[in-house]
Image (cartoon, helix red, strand yellow):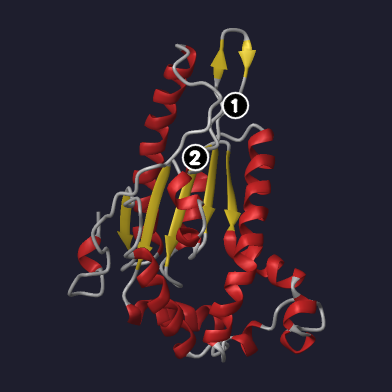
Amino acid sequence: MGKKYVIMETKGDEKMSVAYLISIVGITGSGKSTISKFLKEMIPDSEIIDGDVRKHDAFAEQRELLGDEWYNPDGTINTKKLALFPEKYHQWSHVTDPRVSQMIDGDIEQITAKGKKVIILEWYALTRLKFWNQADLRILMNANKADRHKRLSARHGNRFPESFYDTRDERLKADYTQLSVAPDFTFVNEAGFEEIRSYASQVAQYVERELIVRLDKSIRGDISLIQQTNDGIIKCGNPFDTPNDFTTLKK
C-alpha cells in the first residue's frame, strides 16, 4: 500500500497543484539519465530526482557503520574500491536503500510544494523501493551489453571492472522480472541520443494528454486529495526473457 503524490489542480476558487510522478528504471548504461534530461526539456514545470545522487548521500551518512577505509578524503564513498566487491555493495544497499527512500520522499514533497507539475525520478533500483508502484507513469530502459559497456567505458574509463556491472545487472534483471506493475513504456537504447530523444518525445506527448485529462477531472471535482493504494499484485511477464538481449522489447 502506498500513496500517490496527487494534489488537485483546481477546485472552485481553491488554487492547487499537481505532481505527476514518472519513474524510470534500467540497468547501468541503458540511457536513464539521458531520457530524463530530454523529458525535462520537453515537459514544462518538470524536475528530475536522481536516485544515484541520493544513494551517494546515503552512503556518506553511513561512514561510522561501514568504516573509514571505504571513503575518500572528502567524505564520499570510494566507488572504485567498492566496485571490486560487488557482493558487499549489494549487502550494504539493504542498509542505505531505506534512507534513500526517505530522501526521495522529501524531494518529492519539496518539488510538489514548489508547484512543479511533473517529477521525473530515475534510478536503477526504484523497483526495490516503493516508487515504481506509486508512479503515474513507468519507463523501463535497456540496451545490449556491448553498447552499455562501450558507453560506460567512455563515461568512467576503467574505473569499474566489467564484473561489477555484470554482477549488479544480474541482480537488477532478477528484480525487474518480479515487477508487480508492468512498465508503461519499454525502450531499448540502440542508436544513442537521437533515438532516446524520439522516445522522450513519445513520452512527453503522452504526459501532456494525461495532464489535460487530470486537469479536466479536477475542475469537475473528480480528483480529491487522497491516498491511492496498490493493494493487488499483478505479475507481468519477464521483460528480459528475449533472445536478443532485450532488443525485441522496443515499443
Element on which disc 1 rests: loop
Q: Residue at x 69, y 66 (%)?
A: 58
**Relative to 166, 123 lies left or right:** right
Whether 189 is drawn above or below 48: the answer is below
The secondary structure type at the circle numbered 2 is loop
- Residue at the image point whose x is 81% and y is 78% from the top: 74
Q: Answer whether residue 247 is visible to the viewer in this image.
A: yes
Which of these two is toward me, 185 or 158? 185
Q: Cα distance, mark 1 to mark 2?
A: 16 Å
- The extreme top residue here reads 12
Near-viewer residue (23 or 231): 231
Q: Which residue is mark 2?
A: 43
Can residue 38 be seen at all in this image of the molecule? no
- Quarter of the picture holding the C terminus: bottom left
Crowding around mark 1 (Cα neighbors within 10 Å: few <14, some 14 to 19, many 20+) is: some
Q: In this image, 157 relative to 77: left or right?
A: left
Residue type marked 2: Ile
Compare residues 209 and 138 and report the one nearer the observer: 138
| Marked residue nearer the N-terminal end (1 or 2) | 1
Residue, x 30% and y 49% (percent of image)? 234
Question: In this view, which residue lies farthest toward the left?
Answer: 243
- Left or right relative to 111: residue 214: left
How far across and how far down the image is residue 24, in percent? 45, 55
Q: Which residue is mark 1?
A: 17
Q: Quadrant of residue 167?
A: bottom left
Front tag of 1 and 2: 1
